[in-house]
Image (cartoon, rainbow, N blue to C red):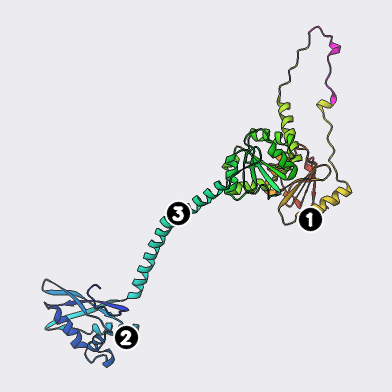
Amino acid sequence: MGKISPVSSKYIINSTIEIEGVVDRPDVIGAIFGQTEGLLGEDLELRELQRSGRIGRIEVNIDTKGGKSIGSIIIPSSLDKAETAIVAAALEIIQRIGPCNAKVKVQNIEDVRVSKRSFVIERAKQLLKQLMDKVMPDSTEIAEEVAYSVRVMEVCEYGKDRLPAGPCIDDSDEIIVVEGRADVLTLLKHGFKNVIAMNGTSVPQTVIDLSHRKDLVAFVDGDRGGNLIIRDLLNVAEIDFVTRAPDGKEVEELAKKEIHKALRSRITAEQAKLELSSIDTSQSIRRPVITRPMPASMPTAAVPRPMPAMSAPAPRLKPALRDEERRHLGEMLESLIGTRGAYVLDEKLSVLGKVPFAELNSTLKSLNAGVYAVVFDGVVDASLVEVADKTSIKHIVAMDSKVDPASCRLNIVTAAML
């Protein structure tokens, strides 16, 4: 197309020509004009069409081999589809060029706009890829760098202990207490500005003073050090809620989703005390008990005999709900419909915590004592019963059950039974 006349061409007629003899290019062009003259009427006369610019320059390429001429004819057209097809078909009536027989065959009519559209699409893909590979990451990095610098600027020193803290300590009713400055930066990064650090394992007086005026949420690492910090805070400050990072992780390592999940699953200070006491109890049980051997001279009658109850323990009776308990638990179950949530209750039917049903098993595993009943929007399965059977839970209230209530010690109550 480089030699085609720059008309507003919409179509390109591509055809081939075979001549039984040797001819020149002007002979072919002359035959095209001469043999189609008067054939298609005045409106489609090739000379007039070319003069008005509706037909471009006719390009003929001829190659002679073995006494025969083979080549191609290319005609650009700005006519409509029907007129261009008529002109293309007219080329095939050419049967002689000079004294030689000839045969013209139209290969195709190319829509130039399709080619241009394909070029536009491919080029647009390349430009978009360059934009995504180069421009977008740079913009994101700039935004992150600016946001990080702003967060670092937001870290201030609070109180007489000059503790690292966010800018909204005085304005917030609830304060998140973490271990160190890195934890403060992590929470600021994800939009939590009501956070203050203890700067060590000992509880500063500033945190103690804050606990008398505001609600405090202790957010500690998921390790043994986190348990020690919780114990110290509960002893000297008025902590309202407690939450931990996942086991083996530190607060500064958490992603935004993990932070939100941990804060949503926080527990009350009373429940945290029960957990710590259960941990201490389990550790004391694991300590080896040293028994002294009985002297050989002791009379046989003095040797204590095993009690019958030790060899054949009496079966425990399955607990039952009182009428007022059944009514109260039924109302709680009704309030949970559609929430996929779970209430963990003590013996007074007070709510120790509310957790998503998906986290109920893990919550019960961490609570070895102090739980009387569980009410949740879901179905009781074998895994839940197995976990609950190892705790102090006596009643499970749910929408339905896949477990036969008679096959376990727990009192399983479904919505249909309330």
Work out which residue is located at the far top of the displayed protein and give it: 297
Q: Secondary structure at mark 1?
A: helix
Q: Secondary structure at mark 3?
A: helix
Position in image of residue 411 (x %, y %): 81, 44
What residue lies at 85% left-to-right and 38% top-to-bottom?
317
Comparing marks 3 and 2, which lies closer to the viewer?
A: 3
Residue 49 visible at all:
yes
Residue highlighted by disc 1: 334
Q: Which mark is residue 137?
A: 3
Residue highlighted by disc 2: 83
Q: Residues within 10 Å of mark 1 (few under 14, many from 20)?
A: some
In which quadrant will I find the N terminus? bottom left
**First reached walking from the N terminus: tag 3 or tag 2:** 2
The answer to whether the residue labelled 3 contacts the one labelled 2, judged by CB atoms less than 8 Å apart, is no
Q: Give the alpha-carbon distance from disc 3 to disc 2, as whole Å.
A: 52 Å
Position in image of residue 248 (x %, y %): 60, 37
**Magenta residues (range):** 295-308
Position in image of residue 175 (x %, y %): 68, 45
What residue lies at 71% left-to-right and 55% top-to-bottom?
339
**First reached walking from the N terminus: tag 1 or tag 2:** 2
Q: Give the alpha-carbon distance from disc 1 to disc 2, as whole Å.
A: 77 Å
| Amino acid type, label 2 | Glu
